[in-house]
Structure formats: structure tokens, C-alpha cells
Amino acid sequence: MPSPIVSDAATKLHSQQIVACIWDFDKTLIAGYMQSPLFRHFNVDEKRFWNEVNALPGLYAARGQKVHRDTIYLNHLLSYVKGGPMKGLSNALLRKLGAELKFYPGLPAFFEELRNIPLSRPEYVRHGLKLEHYVVSTGLAEMIHGSAIAPFVENIYGCELIENPLPPFFSTQPELAVEANPEVAQIGIAIDNTSKTRCVFEINKGTNKNPEVDVNAKVHADDRRVPFRNMIYIADGPSDVPVFSVVRKGGGKAFAVYDPSNPAEFRQNDLMLQTGRIHAYGPANYTPASSSHMWMRMHVQEICDRVVHEQELYLARRVSGPPRHLHKDDPAPAPQMPKQNFLFGE
């Protein structure tokens, strides 16, 4: 007896009804850098710290050592912890300081407004559309988790620090000492502007929802949880060009923002538009009257409309019309391909 025919819809891993807005953090959602509350807490000169960080690659190069410019600040931060100026820095404190971060106008309300778009029309609801926000940052994940934006975000990708690392030979010790005062001492995860693309592929393939799907595994385009064409990536400048490129190549949208008070940032974004790096740019202002607000809302709706159209077109192609009664003078019906069975019957 021949095996039943199973439709592609029954065997696909995901129905691809997710729309994703993926955000950079520093200078995209907030003005400046998120570490400012940390410097204020420990009374550390912020400008001096960053000047030292900027000098480190050259100083280490003179020693014949290479470092990564995007993440060397993490090492210097840990030097401040070990050396004393930031003694006692913990992940709990980082999360607490994250609550001090001030967001650009319109946030976080705009995040909730975008999430509600898939609930705004009956056809969107009928097809189960959903919008998810993600943050991908070279900053400190714990500070973002503690910020006002965290409740609206599906996943946060950022740099992680390890408290009180395990000592040598810990595997043979019957008991490990309980550290009363946790303090960050090692880098757990370092996100740079190139590895941001890995995070976007995790969202694309659904690795963040199903760890059994390795980000390097070959996954058919139809089986990926969030197609690139369902993504909008929002960031502030040239350092995000690698992610802009990946999202654009996959059919998604790339949008850059600039500080309205900074003409250099405006010029920088305009150059990225002229060179085909982004689709559009606007001010880092997310209130309803802002062009950035209107552009993103419009394109989220366009993605939702396209997903609905694709879903209905797919269904129309897979399901034949119902049989009808024929009279003797009616022409014979045109031959049709046999209808394929779905997983739980016809």
C-alpha cells in the first residue's frame, strides 16, 4: 500500500509568520554609551577611560600583541575591577545600573506599538502573525536586562562577564567555596560588530528558541524561523555595516538613525544611503511625528501584508475547490491534480 502524501506545510519546521525588529543599542536607543551610569557609580572619569581604551590597540601592537578594538574595553573594565577603581562590580550591580539608562524620545512605548501591529487587523490575527524585538549590542547584556526596554524584548545579545570564576582542579574538589561577595573577573561572551551577524543568523534559524538547531547547521530557507525578508535592522552607523549587508542581502530592511543635534552623524548616514548600505535613515526620535516612527511602522505593515499574501497564495495552491453537483448538460469538469493530504487528514 503506497505511503500517504504529506504536504510541505506539515513538514516545515516553522510557518515563518514572525516579523523581527533587531536593534543596536548605544546611540540607537540611547544617546551615548550605556556604561555612563557605571562610571558615575564608581566616580571614574568616563572620558579618561575611553581615551585609555582607544590607546590600547596601539600600545599592545607595539608589544607584538593583537587585540580587537570592539571588545578590548571589556579587558580594561576588568583591569579597573582588579586594580581597585571598580572593586566589587557584580552582574547584579550592572543590572541595577541599567535602570538608570535614559532612552530616546518615544521609547519604550514605540516597541509596544510595533508589537501590536500584528494584532491590528483580522487577517494578521487569522494568520497568526507576531512581531518580536531583539537587541544585538557590543555593550553589556546585564545593563540592557536591567533597563526599561527589557520587558519588550524577546532576546538580548550582548557581552557577558563571569563572576568569581572556578579555580584550577575544581573538578576534583568535593566542595567549592561559596563566594559571599560576587565580582566580575572574566569575559564570558564578547560581541563585536562582526559577530553580530552570528546573532542575526541565530534569530533567522531559530537557534535562540531551539538550541538543538546549531547556528552553523545547514537549514533550508523554508525551515528558518524568521526569514531575513521579515527583518528590519536598526542601528546608528558604519560599524553595523556587516549586519546591514546580511539583512539586505536576504531581502530585509536596513535603517540607520542619527542624533538630530549631530550634523556629522546625519552626513554619515546619508553617505551610507548613497553607497547602498541602507534603505533609509532618520532621527533617533521614535515619537509618532518622527519620520523614523512612520518609516518603521509602514514597513512592518508591508511585511505583515506580504506574509498574509504569501500564506493565502500558498493555501490556494495546496487546496482544491469542493466537488459540486453536475447536470447532464454541464461540460465535463477539467481534470485536476489529486489533492495532497495534510498531516491530520484531508
Image (cartoon, rainbow, N blue to C red):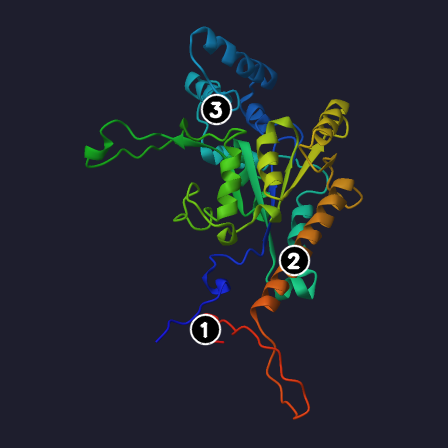
Task: Identify residue type, mark 3.
Answer: Leu
Image mark for residue 118: 2
* Residue type, label 2: Pro
Name the residue nearer the viewer: 134 or 172: 134
Residue found 72% across the figure and 32% down from its top: 273
In the picture as drawn, the residue positioned furthest to the bottom comes out as 328
Query: How far across and how far down the image is residue 38, in percent?
Result: 55, 27
Q: Position of residue 213 (x, y in %)?
A: 41, 48
Dot 3 crowding, Cα within 10 Å, few <14, some 14–19, many 20+: many
Residue 184 pos. (x, y %): 42, 28
Q: What element carries label 3?
A: helix
The residue lying toward the viewer, choosing from 132 and 19, is 19
Image position of 125 (left or right of 7): right
Residue in the image at 52% along x and 30% along y: 194
Residue drawn at x 66%, y 60% is: 309
Task: Let me know if residue 86 appears in the view.
Answer: no
Residue 74 badge: 3
Marked residue nearer the N-terminal end (2 or 3): 3
Within the image, what quadrant is residue 239 found in? top right
Question: Which residue lies at the image location 62% right of the left edge and 39% below the top edge?
Answer: 248
Describe the element under mark 1 as helix, strand or loop.
loop
Q: Earlier in the sequence, mark 1 or mark 3?
A: 3
Return the mark for residue 344: 1
Camera-nearest label, 2 or 3 = 2
